[in-house]
Structure formats: C-alpha cells, structure tokens
Image (spheres, rainbow, N blue to C red):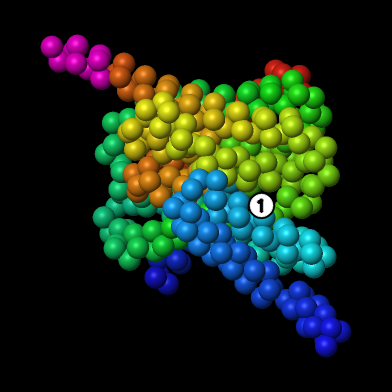
Amino acid sequence: MLQSVTILLLFQLVGEVLSQAFNLPIPGPVVGMGLFFAALTQPWMRSDELRQTAQNLLQHLSLLFVPAGVGVMLHARRVSEELLPIVAALVLSTVLAIAVTALTTRRLVKMLSARRDARAR
Amino acid sequence: MRDSFREIWVYLAATPLLGLTMTLGAYLLGDWIYRRTNKHPLFNPVLLAIIVLVAVLGATHTPYPTYFDGAQFVHFLLGPATVALAVPLYFNFSKLRRLWLPLLGGLIAGSLTAAISAIGIAWLLGASPQTLISLAPKSVTAPVAMGIVEKLGGLPSLTAILVVSTGILGAVLGPWTLDVLRVRDEAIRGFSIGVASHGIGTARAFQESEEAGAFSGLAMGLNIVATALMLPVLVHLLGLR
C-alpha cells in the first residue's frame, strides 16, 4: 500500500511540475492521471496492490469533496439573493448536459456501427 | 463547568484534529443515512455531510478557515485520487478504444450544453454578470473551475460551491435522467454523468459499476481539457467580458 501511494503521489508531483512549468490550463493531478495511464501500458507498472489501493481511494471519492462544499457558508448571502437563477441554472443545465451527452454518444455509436455493417456487407 | 467546556472547545478548534474528525464523522453519518434509506438519491452522503457540518460550524461560530485547517487533509487526497482514476480506466482500455469517436462527440456536445444552458438560464432569471461567469465552468472539477473563473474575472470561491452543487445534482438526477432516456450501456451512462458532474458524479457512477466509474473518470478528465479550451472563447462570444 505504501508503495502504491508513493507511486500515485509521484505521478501527481510530476504532473504538477509539468503543469506549472509549461503554464498548462490543465491542473497537475489531471496531467498526472494522463501520465499514469500511459505508464500502466507497461506490464511492470501494474500490480494487484496498485489496483487495490486505487480502488480503496476511489471508493470514498465523494468524501473528498466535503471540505470544499462546506465553503457554501462563505457565500450564504449571494446564494440566497440569487437563489432562483442559481438553482434553476444548476438543476436544468446538469440534466440537459447528461441527456445531451448520452444521446449524442448513443447516436454516434449507432451511426458508426451501421456504417461498419454496411462496409462488411 | 460551562466555562471549562468552552475552553476545551476553543483549544480543540485551534487544532486540525477537530475539523478532520468532524469531516469524517459527518460523512459516515451521511453514508449511514444514505444506506438506511436504501440509497435514496436525495439522501446523498456528500449533501448530508455538508448540511451537518455547516449547521455545527454555524452553531459554534467556527469560521470556515479554522475548519479547513483540519479538513485540508481530506481535501488534499483529491489529487492522488485523480491520479488513481487512471487505474480503472486502463482496465477498460479495449472498450475505450472502440468508443473513442462517439465519446469525443458526446463530450463536445455535453460540455457546450452544460456551459451555455447554465449561463442562459441564469441570465434569463436575472443573475448578476459575476454570478454568470462563476457558473460557466461548474461541470469541471473544482480546482480547474476555480482557476478558469479567476482568469475570467468571476469569484473562485463561489465557483467552488457551484461545482460541488452541480456534482451532487448530477449524482442525484443523473441515473434517473439516464433511466428515463433508456440509456443502458454502462460506459455511456458513466461518461455522461462524468461530463456533467465531474468527481462527485464519478463517485456515484462507481456505485453502478467499475466500468461506469472508469468512463465517468475519463469524461471528467477530458471535460477539463474541453472546457479550458472552449470557455474563454464562449464567454467572449456571449459578451460577458
């Protein structure tokens, strides 16, 4: 476990350094995730221990957002003054974004497989 | 007795121990209620934990920075957890390779929909320009959204809570929306939730299956790139800046 955590932190660190050094619009941990994904294509990088540690960490992913969420108390006034536009925008746009993503992806999958079938015939 | 209790509280409030313990305790309580209600989406553990913590901090007059001194240890783990998302993604690589073009199309459509519809609806209902800009990147994970908003002249700390709220909404309403639309493919379900509601949605998607979680994590990562590239242009086109 210690080894896996160190590997994760190392990739985050490298990602952080690259993100800062090249002034990327993408934050360090996400750069680290990309690099780690590339590294996992090497068989010697993969271990059951690593998979287990990742699973443990991701199982409680939602806990990690609690401290940022409690920050709502800093903006109680603005949020209560603009409650209707904020709530309506968040609820509707979230549902719309999920629906549009799912329907677009599904349509494209069908179009591509239809084209593949036509070519096979 | 009362005075000494207050003294103990003042002492504890000044150490990270209290904020950290309260965060874990509130989350465990939220998770317990969530499971007791048969995982009813409205009893989202993150939402419950935030309500409990805000109530306790408000009642004890504890300022947010004092709380965050302890809670930052939990907050810090977001970084390594983001890196760890590569692991489930790797184990779904073959499906990813087959689906990359439809996923890319879905990403662009979904990412644009999230930003444009949020700005449009809030504008119609009379939100201030600063709120509009702070709303725009709400579907991207918090640290990125805050960075983008800072550059565009919004309020980063307001964005942080809009991002968390969006995540909770995606976790609550996402599976229901997808059921209504009869989307059954685990990869597409996870991906859609991830585009709209980043890490909190991803946490919810992992509860459906490892495959849904992996594609949700992928969507979260890709939407960062898409939003970082598209949003400055969009805000400029809409005349917000």
Q: Please check the rendered image and state whether residue A115 is part of the magenta-colored stretch, yes or no.
A: yes
- Residue, x 74% and y 78% (percent of image)? B12
Camera sees residue B151: no
Image height of A66 relative to B129, above or below: below
**Which chain is mark 1 on?**
A
Give the residue pinned by disc 1.
Answer: A69
Where residue B107 appears, x then y in whole percent? 47, 28
Where residue B49 appears, x then y in whole percent? 61, 58
**What count of labels does the image hold?**
1
- Residue, x 41% and y 39% (percent of image)? B190
- Quarter of the figure with residue B22: bottom right
A22 on left or right of B7 = left
Kind of element beneath mark 1: helix
Please name the amino acid that badge 1 sits on: Gly
Crowd class of label 1 (few under 14; some 14 to 19; many from 20; radius 10 Å): many
**Most extreme residue toward the left, as rendered?**
A121
Numbered range of the magenta stretch: A113-121
B87 on left or right of A30 = left
- Which of A16/A73 is in front? A73
**Most extreme residue toward the right, as rendered?**
B3
Q: Quadrant of the N terminus of chain B?
A: bottom right
Image height of A16 relative to B232, above or below: below
- Residue, x 72% and y 26% (percent of image)? B122
Camera sees residue B106: yes
- Residue, x 61% and y 33% (percent of image)? A91
Q: Main secondary structure of the magenta part?
A: helix
- Which of B126/B194 is in front? B126
Q: Please check the rendered image and state whether residue B50 is part of the magenta-colored stretch, yes or no.
A: no
Where residue B104 appears, x then y in whole percent? 43, 27
Q: Quadrant of the C terminus of chain B?
A: top right
B135 on left or right of A31 = right
